């Protein structure tokens, strides 16, 4: 009923401009029984005759109307069968990793001969650059602004009708869609299940995993663009080690002189009562100054730099061991499930009268195997990502050498961004009165690259002079 031409036809019938409606076959007008009933109601109300050239029936008597309804029921049945076959075909194609159409993707072109995706090398380089920019900027809005500055835009393409589409500046939503498109690692997604694609990957698993982790982290903490009205430098970064809960940035205003005092309070204590946590609250200014001072000191003290590097390596190695243990356990589980699957398939082949129950068991077993395989693949991808996160001594030295000279010249907003760039987590332990800082490898590497580029440019200028 939503077709424009059909709407005009019904409007003409309502206006009394039609005496007789003639169709070649009933299903040319509509294959929906409900829609056809509405059409006939309008035609009957306006005394408009209805004639099918190739089908003989008379709608003025009950037998004719029954014949018409039977014809329509078969037409609707045919439409539903076609739709089911189309969905099944698309589902099978997705499971085989085929491209089944849709909006063109930056980095790929569609092969006109077979509908396969072909890598567009120029655009693929742009995709890699976009992922690197997001890791440097740490936020969707700031990354989109940097993309606009560099002139990077969405995929340009031409429709079958010759209409040009795309070529727009990235916004927060379009950038998020690109960064979460699993097609870039050579896979396809169908109804939440991931399958290996026929197309080649543009990105390595390492950078893909790091971007997804950063997106998830920003989703939990609000991201670098989170509303930060009163300058909470560690907002979204600081955690209570006693409760393993985030600490919330808050403030109070004195009644006497209207002065504002800022604090970080344990979110667990705030929700469940102040007696449930020994931390209670921390003066925001004190803890922020301590963290900034610690980072400044690292850039000036070789022994402290080595200690920080050693701690980062230990953290990285512990995380790798945990992931490797998880992967080994999952692979062992997969081997056991595989043996169980082979035994069950063999029993089904004997046809001992319990085939139905065993087939259901096999289906459940295969679901467990698929889930275990996905988890094992996730663990392997995370191992690759963590392995590539170890920062060298040179990179750490370069990054922290930049921090101290520029810190005081930054605006509060820029200081917040810089802190989020190099710090992943700050932990406060009330029992020990200790503060731990977990650094962000990708941010440190980005800062190091920036310093390296600046030094290289300075050397080039000196040579020219």
Image (spheres, rainbow, N blue to C red):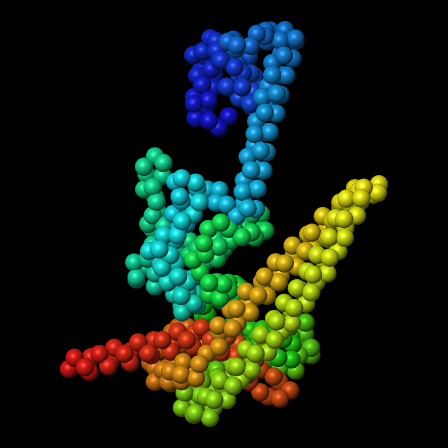
Q: Choose between 22 and 91: the one closer to the eye.
A: 91
Which quadrant would residue 314 be assigned to in this image? bottom right
Q: Residue furthest left?
A: 465
Q: Is residue 116 above or below residue 31?
A: below
Left or right, residue 69 beside residue 286: right
Rendered position, 256 above or below 98: below
Q: Residue at x 56, y 20 (%)?
A: 36
* Residue in the image at 52% along x and 81% along y: 312
Which residue corresponds to the image point at 77% horizontal and 44% vertical from the top-left? 349
Residue 34 drawn at (x, y percent): 59, 24
Q: Give the total number of marks visible in the rendering.
A: 0
Q: Is residue 284 above or below residue 224?
A: below
Q: Is residue 217 visible?
A: no
Horizontally, residue 239 falls left or right of residue 401, namely: right
Residue 405, percent from left and from top: 34, 85
Q: Is residue 26 visible?
A: yes
Near-viewer residue (436 or 292): 436
Looking at the figure, which quarter contains the C terminus?
Answer: bottom left
Residue 264 appears in which quarter of the rendering?
bottom right
Residue 40 location (% of width, % of height) = 55, 16
Location of residue 429 in the rendering, given as x and y in whole percent from the top left corner: 61, 84
Residue at the image point whose x is 55% and y is 67% from the top:
382
Q: Quadrant of residue 414?
A: bottom left
Q: Furthest-right residue in view?
A: 353
Q: Nearer the viewer, residue 297 or 248?
A: 297
């Amino acid at each position: 009923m939503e077709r424009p031409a059909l709407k005009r036809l019904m409007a003409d019938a309502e206006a009394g401009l039609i005496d007789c409606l003639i169709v070649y076959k009933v299903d040319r007008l509509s294959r929906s029984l409900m829609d056809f009933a509405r059409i006939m109601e309008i035609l009957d109300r306006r005394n408009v005759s209805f004639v099918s050239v190739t089908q003989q029936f008379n709608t003025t008597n009950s037998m004719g109307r029954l014949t018409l309804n039977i014809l329509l029921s078969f037409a609707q049945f045919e439409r539903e069968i076609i739709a089911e076959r189309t969905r099944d075909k698309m589902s099978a194609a997705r499971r085989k990793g085929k491209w089944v159409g849709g909006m063109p993707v930056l980095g790929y072109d569609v092969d006109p001969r077979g509908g396969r995706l072909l890598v567009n090398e120029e655009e693929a380089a742009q995709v890699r650059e976009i992922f690197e920019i997001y890791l440097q900027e740490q936020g969707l809005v700031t990354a989109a602004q940097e993309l606009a500055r560099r002139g990077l835009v969405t995929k340009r393409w031409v429709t079958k009708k010759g209409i040009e589409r795309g070529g727009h500046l990235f916004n927060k939503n379009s950038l998020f869609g690109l960064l979460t498109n699993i097609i870039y690692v050579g896979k396809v997604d169908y109804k939440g299940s991931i399958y290996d694609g026929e197309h080649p990957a543009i990105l390595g698993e390492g950078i893909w995993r790091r971007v997804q982790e950063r997106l998830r982290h920003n989703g939990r903490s609000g991201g670098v663009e989170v509303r930060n009205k009163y300058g909470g430098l560690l907002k979204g970064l600081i955690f209570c080690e006693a409760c393993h809960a985030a600490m919330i940035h808050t403030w109070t205003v004195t009644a006497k002189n209207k002065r504002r005092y800022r604090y970080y309070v344990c979110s667990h204590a705030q929700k469940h009562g102040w007696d449930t946590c020994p931390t209670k609250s921390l003066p925001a200014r004190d803890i922020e100054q301590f963290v900034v001072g610690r980072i400044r000191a690292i850039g000036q003290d070789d022994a402290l730099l080595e200690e920080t590097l050693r701690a980062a390596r230990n953290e990285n190695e512990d995380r790798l061991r945990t992931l490797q243990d998880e992967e080994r356990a999952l692979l062992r589980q997969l081997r056991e499930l595989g043996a169980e699957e082979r035994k069950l398939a063999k029993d089904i082949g004997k046809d001992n009268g319990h085939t139905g129950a065993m087939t259901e068991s096999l289906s459940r077993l295969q679901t467990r195997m698929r889930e275990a395989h996905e988890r094992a693949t996730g663990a392997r991808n995370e191992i690759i990502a963590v392995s590539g996160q170890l920062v060298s001594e040179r990179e750490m030295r370069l990054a922290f050498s930049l921090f101290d000279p520029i810190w005081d010249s930054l605006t509060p907003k820029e200081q917040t961004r810089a802190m989020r760039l190099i710090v992943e987590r700050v932990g406060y332990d009330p029992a020990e009165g200790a503060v731990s800082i977990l650094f962000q490898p990708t941010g440190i590497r980005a800062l190091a690259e920036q310093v390296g580029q600046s030094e290289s440019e300075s050397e080039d200028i000196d040579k020219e002079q």
